Amino acid sequence: MRRIGGRDIVAAILIAILAGAIFTAPPLQTLQGLSLDILTALRGKIDGDRRDPATSPVVVVAIDGETYETPPFKGSPTQTWTREIGRVLGSISDGGAKVIGFDVIFKNSIEQSEIPFGDAPFGARLRGFDRDYLIALRQISDAGKLVLGEILSNDHPEVPYRAQQLAVRNNVRALNVHTDADDVIRRMPLSFSIDGKPVPTMAVELAARALGAKFEIVPSGAAELSGYAIPSTVPNTLTLNFRGLGRDVPTFSFADLRACVEKGDRDFFRRAFDGKVVLLGTILNFEDRKLTSMRLSGGYDGTPSARCATPAPASTAQRKRSDVAGVFVHAAAVRNLIEHDAVTELGTPARTLLTIAFAAIIACAAGALAPSGALIAWLGLTIVYAVVAVGAFVHALALPLTEPALASLAALAIMIGYRFVLADRDERFLRKSFALYLAPEVIETMVASGKMPALGGELRNVTMFFSDLSGFSSIAETMTPGELVTLMNEYLSAMTDIIESHGGYVDKYIGDSIVAMFGAPADDPAHARNAVRAALNCHEKLAELNAGHPAFAGHGLSHRIGLNSGEAVVGNIGSRRRFNYTVMSDTVNVASRLEGANKYYGTAIMASETTMAQTGDSFAWRELDAIRVQGRGEPIRVFEPLAETGAESAEQAKVAAAYAEGLACWRAREFAKAAEAFGGVANIDPASARFAKRATVLTENPPPPDWTPVNTLEGK
């Protein structure tokens, strides 16, 4: 994780403010509506609210396809249906309906027709055709149970026929809906100003009569109905809550109700309509279809209710559609008002602040994490927030959904761009500038802290690795400078790759020598094992280079490696103006002496007892000797790693066994036996050959009684 500084936090906040302001600005107002659509769809999937239609305070009487196909309506103009409508409305009113609202407008009357018929106009014979219908309207209206609908418009108003208006004593209310900029209906107007006075719309009027209350505009400007403060983010509107997706509204076919009137089944009307708000409207596939916030989830044209007199057509099965019949928009509004269940939306300031806060969190994540990690954080946080938003929407609270999601995604992209162009420029400079000089771990520490290295060190347990090419000076004299550089670059590159692949850090190159440490800068509990393994691999790699690389051909390079483990001070050491990340201690000096000690035994790798002990049983070893190196009084037991445990060859096992026998005899002052044991493998093992010579000398010239089996090395 990247350390995020004060400048980055300020940038994240500014980016979040910009993104939040853009995505909640009026030009993108449709995002607010899209949030409602998505929340409605998610709630329908997750919550699956399926309320019993029988509990609905609102029912719909549908002039549907069945009505158009049923006599006496089939083939006749709708103006001729008024008598039957009056009869059905009368039965509904007598059945105990609280109020009936018209979502259909009969703008004309059949009595207006002037079609010639013989010597007299046909219209003359139809005068008085609507008399029974108008009487029914008057009676139901006088009982306070009827409201006709109209469309208010300056250009093309739609109003009921004048006789109908008079019959209901101008009990007419607006059916206008509130359409958002994307032509989707998510809200309903509450009132319209007529002659300077607020007049409630159809849905509000029906709910008010059902509740026996009066719609009021309080001094604060808020609307109230029966003590319910109607939530209204968009002034003078109600945000629709399609909780049941239309399935919770019982729907009766007008054709069946007309047949029920003929049948005289008053009990059916009482069971179906007692205490209900009734909406009369059309449900057709080609007329009065509305896109609402159910458009993503799909809505239903109500739930077919029990039949009275005729069997249901085979085609009445419920079908989910992106649009619904307009009458169900009014039905939802009425139900929301009666049940105090309209959607509460956050106002613009609160929505903007929430969007900015969400974007700021993601912007900070983008500043601290890698782009892929920030994207995962955005996805995870968005999912969690969506779950919370759906939970709130179950309780009719609509939190913004698309605005925070999109604004935070934009903030993420901008923050990544900011990092690439500005913030990470310094980081890239540090990595590029110091990659060839410092350990990756040191660079990561610099980047994470935001600080350059400083003088100081710490005590760490490490394993030191020293290597040097044998007799390289004489070889270099036979080479041109170009050949020498090529050879050294190939050798040092190959050895360094192996060291670093095992977790080591190359401290420095001294000519053809390599100084490396294991266990720092990065902590490594297995530093001794990794150092020994790296030494064995380096030895194998040099053999490969000698055998197959053109630059090494004819030179037969060999090297010596010394390993020692112990406490050492590691850190930035040097002057105040210039320093290196390096290591200092006696542990380092001993490793250097062990590298040189290899030439006394003809070995390639020599490790101290402490290194051998820390590797456990990972390797096959042979003890070489107890030596006293220059500059150190205490003797050191030294060992040679042969191979990984179980991977040693038969020859290595034979030599190790003979060497161990000879060393035991040597330390027991049985020099003749030691010379014999060492001599048995002297032709294949330089260390045994050297010990055989020493044992032979001591056989002929025994040491004094105070002799100790410690080899004191005179050189480095």
Image (tube, rainbow, N blue to C red):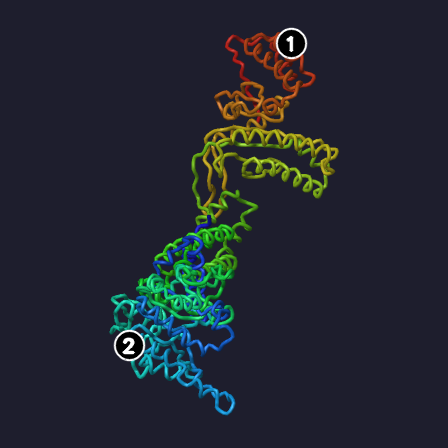
Q: Position of residue 540 (x, y in %)?
A: 65, 30
| Amino acid residing under circle 2 | Asp
Q: CA distance from mark 1 to mark 2?
A: 134 Å
Of the image marks 1 and 2, the number of the one nearer the N terminus = 2
Estimate how packed mark 2 is, as few (under 14), some (14 to 19) or many (20 or more) residues with alpha carbons within 10 Å. some
Q: Position of residue 149 (x, y in %)?
A: 38, 76
Q: Quadrant of residue 649?
A: top right
Please determine whether, in this image, residue 41 is positioned above or below residue 436.
Answer: below
Q: Quadrant of residue 478?
A: top right
Please determine whether, in this image, residue 522 is positioned above or below residue 73.
Answer: above
Determine whether the residue tagged by mark 2 lies in a helix, strand or loop.
helix
Q: Is residue 245 visible?
A: no
Q: Position of residue 357 (x, y in %)?
A: 39, 59
* Residue toward you, 578 or 322: 322
Estimate how packed mark 1 is, as few (under 14), some (14 to 19) or many (20 or more) residues with alpha carbons within 10 Å. some
Please determine whether, in this image, residue 57 is positioned above or below residue 591.
Answer: below
* Residue toward you, 562 or 439: 439
Q: Quadrant of residue 469?
A: top right
| In the image: residue 563, left or right of residue 109 | right
* Residue toward you, 157 or 52: 52
Task: Say which residue label 2 marks.
Answer: 142
Q: Position of residue 358 (x, y in %)?
A: 41, 58
* Residue toward you, 142 or 57: 142
Task: Say which residue label 1 marks.
Answer: 676
Determine whether the residue tagged by mark 1 lies in a helix, strand or loop.
helix
Identify the residue shown where x is 46% and y is 40%: 571
Q: Is residue 625 visible?
A: yes
